[in-house]
Amino acid sequence: MQLNFRTLGSGKPLVILHGLFGSADNWQSQAKIFASYFQVYLIDLRNHGHSPWSEEHNYALLAQDVQTLLEEQKVENAILLGHSMGGKVAMTIAQNTIGLVEKLIVVDMGMKQYPLHHQHILGGLNAVDLNSISSRSEVDVILREHINSEGVLQFLLKNLYWKQKGELAWRMNFKTLEIHMDEILEAIPAKEVMIQTLFIRGGLSNYILDDDIPELENYFPDSQFETIASAGHWVHAEAPDEFISIVLGFCLR
């Protein structure tokens, strides 16, 4: 699968993988800063952003998509950064390749299986019938009946675009994502990764609990952990300055 991507800056490659329901666009602000130090690759994963849709969606395929792209671009010894679902993709790539990843950054995601917790988002998306809607404001009203968080609401609305005059569409293939939600939430294989790894978690998030750290340290023995106390799951968006400082400190040392 030919993924959509763009690059900013020059130098050592820094590859950024977004999370579920997201896209490369979510990382544009951070990428502009990172581009002063690195050649940044912003990638849309399958079924997201401007990348192709597929009826299949699992971590093996997501990782292979990215590996194929980076091999075609002759990327080696990259810094690989992944948030949420993208974090599991990044860990999977690090498990399965040699020489492609020099450093790994995982943002608010563990290896474990997570319980289903996106029902309110999927409920809101399924309530939106784009065939009978003619404005973005109508979508906003419907989503607010299901989603209380303003941040999550605006995050989802970034996926909405005008396919043609009078016709709205979603960039993400949420119907397929819904079908494969069990695979998205499943644990990744337990394999040791001997790569320098940084785990960044939000202090207000429950994605990486204190009890999860021993397992992560076991399979990522050359790892360190940073907690941004004021941030939830969208760490990079909620505490951008602290997040960028931590990432650069790890990458440039």
Image (tube, rainbow, N blue to C red):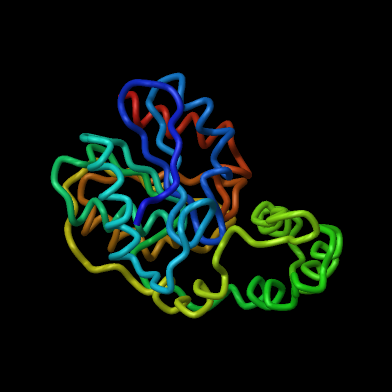
Residue toward you, 228 or 141: 141
x, y percent for residue 65: 32, 55
Residue 107 visible at all: no
Q: Residue at x 28, y 42 (%)?
A: 70
x, y percent for residue 241: 58, 31
Q: Residue at x 28, y 63 (%)?
A: 215
Q: Residue at x 43, y 79 (%)?
A: 182
Q: Quadrant of the N terminus?
A: bottom left
Total tally of numbered discs in the picture? 0
Residue 206 visible at all: yes
Q: Is residue 90 left or right of residue 21?
A: left
x, y percent for residue 89: 35, 57
Q: Is residue 36 left or right of residue 198?
A: right
Q: Quadrant of the C terminus?
A: top left
x, y percent for residue 150: 76, 56
Q: Is residue 16 left or right of residue 78?
A: right
Quarter location, residue 101: top left
Residue toward you, 162 or 221: 162
In the image, residue 247 above or below residue 217: above
Quarter location, residue 247: top left
Which residue extends farthest front?
165
Q: Residue at x 41, y 31 (%)?
A: 40
Which residue extends farthest left?
98
